[in-house]
Amino acid sequence: MARYIGMILLAALVLWTGEAFGECAWVLWVQYKEFSLKELLPGWELQGAYLAREECMRVKEKIWRVHADRYRDQARKGRIEVKEVPYETVTVYHPISDVTHTTSLFCLPDTINPKQ
């Protein structure tokens, strides 16, 4: 019980300290999902942390462009089908293997962990 109370006090202190100083960092997360006939394989990757949301968004757009450009080249060759939500998601369908890959990018406050 004492350990539980200690954890609550620690969490409250961390939350209060962050609010008192107005500090908030932004974290760029990339979520990968693979859909196949057998299963869904989700995964999260922390891409970077930034002091300002605007900086996080700039990096997010650059990374999205890299993914989108790479897949567009393959789509032009007829190997895959690509669907895009600008600066958010790239979904790729491989007709030969019947597998779909989705890459989604999120800038979230450092207080949010999408893995949970």
Image (cartoon, helix red, strand yellow):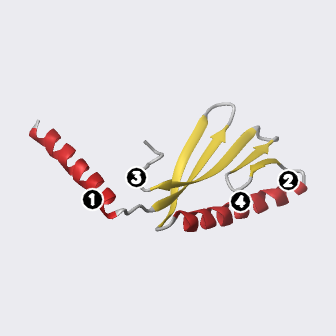
Name the one closer to the observer, 81 or 115: 115
The nearer-to-camera label among 2 and 1 is: 1
Q: Residue 5 appears in which quarter of the rendering?
A: top left
Name the kind of residue labelled 2 in the image. Answer: Ala
Kindly identify which numbered label has been placed on residue 17. Answer: 1
Mark 4 and mark 2 in contact (Cβ < 8 Å)?
no
Q: Residue at x 36, y 62 (%)?
A: 22
* SS for dot 1: helix
Name the one closer to the observer, 67 or 17: 17
* SS for dot 4: helix
Mark 1 and mark 4: span between their CA atoms?
38 Å
Name the kind of residue labelled 3 in the image. Answer: Thr
Mark 3 and mark 1 in contact (Cβ < 8 Å)?
no
Residue that numbered label 3 is attached to: 111
Mark 2 and mark 1: span between their CA atoms?
49 Å
Q: Earlier in the sequence, mark 2 or mark 1?
A: 1
Is 32 on the left-hand or right-hand side of 82?
left
